[in-house]
Image (cartoon, rainbow, N blue to C red):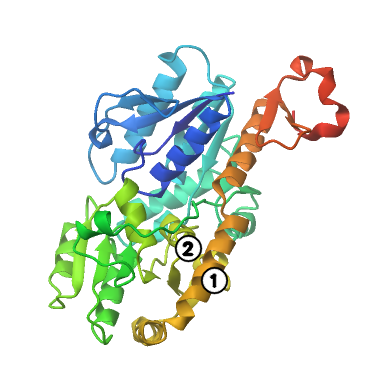
Amino acid sequence: MKIAILGTRGIPGNYGGFETFAEQLGTRLARRGHEVTVYCRRHYSTGDARVYKGVRLVILPTIRHKYFDTVVHTLFSVIHALFFQTGRFDVILICNAANSIFSFIPRLFGIPTLVNVDGLERKRKKWNWIGRTYYLLSEWLSTFLPTAIVTDAQVIRDYYATRYRKESSMIAYGAEVDRQADPERLSQYGLVSNQYVLYVSRLEPENNAHLVIDAYRDVKTDWPLVIVGGAPYAEDYIARLKSTSDRRVRFLGFVFGEDYRVLQQNAYCYVHATEVGGTHPALIEAMGAGNCALTLRTPENLEVIGDAGLIYDSGADLTIQLQRVLDHPEMISEYRRRAMTRVIRHYNWEQITDQYELLLAGLCGHQVVRQANGTNGLIIADAADLPQSLGEQSRTRVVR
């Protein structure tokens, strides 16, 4: 298949969840033989490379503004994909419900579109009433403008089914499973393996970094609370966070790639405080890195964590739970084991790629067969092109 991925800042994933999603899915699809193009925003792209791990990159400008950055770039990307692209895409995957307004345009030219709607973005406190109204409108538009939608959590799938009577494919976010000590790389931050508490998120109010910092004030420990993340349009909120008098709180800003993995894999425990959205990548990544995760009680967070972490309801409750974990290190190993096992079973990137591959192929009208010898990956082709030796028994699904 010839696949385009639109609506993210681009790859490699140097900002947030959608960017990591585009990198993980795009590179895996490319390794399976598909032609994948990811559209990138110029001011987030580094270097002049036009290919990344087998994925073609198209770098386009946008308007750098809180309310226009995403939608303007997606509009430019759709125009490029239709009129300035060599050859024709078989299918276009658009990230973010805010971009649903453009998803009907490729359909006018016979190209199916799939929108990953993400969580309920309109609930984020950073948006004024205009932004919230636009996101509410975008939710509604996503129910009929694209060919299909995909949700990344059962809670979000149920929301669209109940509010809009719109069925969606539920495909979760993924993470890699690994935990390795790397004291040399960790030393650049002045940290010691298994002797710090980690929090990762965009530093925006609904992600509750302030709640975590306030809760940590009453925790009896000398270990640092490490805050990883930032936000391009939240200067006042970030300044408020950094005004804390607690010297144990360390702000590292954005950290990506191998350094980010090292921070995750060497933390004593991980605190997740986000209250808006679907499946949160940082939480699953923390679990895959073998962390004991303490998670704010929301339906989406409970869906991800299951019995593989600890739940808290408030800042005072978080203080109690953190003190308990720090005072009883024997708890850690069991929760680490549960977390990694849960990611392997439910949030494995290869299995998630299988699901997207099958869904995208179905939208293109291709037949999909699994190789009879049990090797990973699917064979996707027009029915006339399938070798007879595959046999009827190997077909797993046919969607036209």
Q: How far apart are marks 1 and 2 (CA)?
A: 8 Å
Image: 90 above or below 132: above
Disc 1 residue type?
A: Ala
The image position of residue 247, as x and y in percent, is: 14, 75
Mark 2, residues whose alpha carbon is within 10 Å: few (<14), some, or many (≥20)?
many
The quarter of the picture where residue 201 lies is bottom left
Looking at the picture, tell me which residue is in the foreground, 88 or 282: 282
Mark 1, residues whose alpha carbon is within 10 Å: few (<14), some, or many (≥20)?
many
Q: Residue at x 15, y 67 (%)?
A: 242
Kind of element beneath mark 1: loop
Nearest to N terminus: mark 1 or mark 2: 2
Label of residue 10 in the image: none
Image: 156 above or below 270: above
Labels 1 & 2 near each other (Cβ < 8 A): yes
The quarter of the picture where residue 150 lies is top right
The image position of residue 71, as x and y in percent, is: 36, 37
Residue furthest right in the image: 392
Q: Which residue is drawn at 76% across and 34% down?
A: 373
Looking at the picture, tell me which residue is in the foreground, 298 or 199: 199
The image position of residue 333, as x and y in percent, is: 49, 74
The quarter of the picture where residue 390 lies is top right
* Residue under numbered circle 2: 287
Disc 2 residue type?
A: Met
Looking at the picture, tell me which residue is in the foreground, 125 or 219: 219
Image: 383 above or below 224: above
* Residue under numbered circle 1: 308
Kind of element beneath mark 2: helix
- Residue 377 appears in view: yes
- Residue 311 appears in view: no
